[in-house]
């Protein structure tokens, strides 16, 4: 769904330029987070504010704000750009643009993807620009860390975004985490998570000990809160990044192993009590049982923390109600080695608890 601010910006743009920014908003995802870009208004002036706007681009932990200016009198001309980093593309010639930004040098006004292509090429140049700024101070700790990390076969230049500003250097690092099987467990997370299951590590220098873990919505839902191992001041990224990567991969594997145990348990119960099954899915099952002329429903709910956290067992009477709702009882933790005996004991207790509650008369369908 388009944000109202973005919708307003697009509506303010002259119709001839709208296809460019509509395509950018709907289809362009940038940065390691693959976050959608956004738009802001530029104050209108007498020369025509409907031909310019500000585009907000994700990069590291920042939001780059670049102004895009079209010429309403010559709509077939490529746009101009004003960057929020004055040192970026400060002194380049036409030959440079033809080689590095061909979508701008050979602007195709009939292609709605034209602006999107230019932005992707400019972002690539901005990454190169930031790495050059880092390498210009080749004696810095951050420069050493960057070079050492690239020496690791697990991390490439495409896995790191670098930002250099003042006395701070930021690295946003994509971790090599295997998430390929997680959608099997959490299909309902797909809408929250646009198909990009990423784990990113944000590290700032000189205070690198305050590393931050950034997980996609699906990974957050699966893994919950993750406490990062302490990164000592003397520690190096080439050791720390594999450590965090292994931690996440192990947690994902534990989750998959637990999921198999959960499904095996449900499958055993469903096969054993096949004739009593009311309903079931990957996480729970409901059975209708009778014991000593007392009919009751057993609901078994198995959470994502199984087997560390045992299943939740709930008994429900089909006769007795309290304030219009069936009486139920959540049972204490169930011993796996005496499942049936435990349930029978609890049902007898539950039946006696229900005796003092008015029951619902059964309807004889044979009459």
Image (cartoon, rainbow, N blue to C red):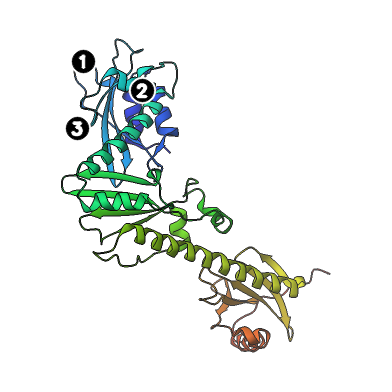
Q: Residues within 10 Å of mark 1 (few under 14, many from 20)?
A: few
Residue denoted by label 1: 47
The earlier-in-sequence mark between 3 and 2 is 3
Along the line of sight, the residue nearer the viewer: 207 or 114 = 207
Q: Is residue 33 left or right of residue 141?
A: right
Q: Does dot 1 land on a helix, a strand or a loop? A: loop
Q: Which mark is residue 91?
A: none
Residue denoted by label 2: 99
Q: Residues within 10 Å of mark 3 (few under 14, many from 20)?
A: few
Residue denoted by label 3: 87
The answer to whether 166 is drawn above or below residue 273 in the figure is above
Q: Does the rendering let one see residue 106? A: yes
Q: CA distance from mark 3 to mark 2?
A: 20 Å
| Quadrant position of residue 186 | bottom right
Label tally: 3
Asked if the residue at tag 2 contacts the one at tag 3, i.e. Cβ–Cβ closer than 8 Å, the answer is: no
The answer to whether 258 is drawn above or below residue 147 in the figure is below
The answer to whether 342 is drawn above or below residue 126 in the figure is below
Along the line of sight, the residue nearer the viewer: 216 or 52 = 216
Asked if the residue at tag 1 contacts the one at tag 3, i.e. Cβ–Cβ closer than 8 Å, the answer is: no
Residue drawn at x 51%, y 76% as measured from the top left: 308
The earlier-in-sequence mark between 3 and 1 is 1
Residue drawn at x 26%, y 20% as measured from the top left: 93
């Amino acid at each position: 769904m388009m944000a109202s601010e973005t919708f307003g910006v697009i509506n303010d743009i002259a119709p001839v330029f709208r296809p460019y920014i509509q395509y950018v908003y709907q289809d362009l995802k940038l940065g390691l987070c693959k976050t959608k870009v956004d738009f802001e208004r530029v104050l209108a002036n007498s020369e025509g504010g409907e031909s310019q706007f500000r585009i907000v681009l994700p990069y590291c932990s920042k939001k780059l704000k670049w102004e895009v200016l079209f010429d309403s009198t010559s709509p077939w001309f490529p746009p101009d750009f004003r960057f929020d980093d004055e040192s970026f593309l400060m002194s380049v010639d036409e030959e440079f643009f033809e080689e590095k930004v061909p979508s701008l040098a050979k602007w195709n006004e009939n292609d709605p993807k034209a602006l999107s292509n230019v932005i992707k090429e400019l972002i690539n140049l901005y990454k190169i620009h930031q790495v050059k700024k880092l390498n210009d101070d080749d004696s810095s700790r951050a420069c050493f860390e960057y070079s050492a990390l690239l020496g690791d076969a697990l991390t490439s230049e495409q896995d790191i975004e670098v930002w250099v500003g003042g006395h701070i250097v930021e690295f946003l690092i994509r971790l090599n985490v295997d998430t390929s099987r997680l959608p099997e467990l959490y299909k309902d997370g797909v809408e929250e998570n646009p198909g990009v299951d990423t784990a990113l590590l944000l590290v700032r220098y000189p205070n690198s000990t305050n590393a931050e873990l950034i997980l996609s919505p699906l990974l957050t839902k699966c893994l919950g809160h993750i406490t990062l191992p302490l990164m000592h001041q003397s520690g190096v990224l080439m050791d720390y990044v594999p450590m965090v990567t292994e931690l996440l991969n192990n947690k994902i594997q534990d989750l998959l192993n637990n999921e198999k145990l959960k499904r095996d348990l449900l499958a055993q119960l469903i096969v054993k009590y096949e004739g009593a099954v009311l309903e079931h899915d990957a996480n729970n099952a409901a059975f209708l049982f009778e014991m000593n002329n007392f009919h009751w429903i057993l609901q078994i709910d198995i959470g994502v923390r199984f087997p560390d956290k045992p299943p939740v067992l709930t008994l429900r009477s089909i006769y007795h109600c309290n304030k219009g709702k069936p009486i139920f009882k959540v049972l204490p933790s169930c011993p796996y080695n005496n499942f049936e005996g435990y349930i029978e004991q609890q049902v007898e207790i539950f039946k006696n608890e229900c005796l003092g509650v008015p029951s619902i008369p059964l309807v004889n369908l044979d009459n």
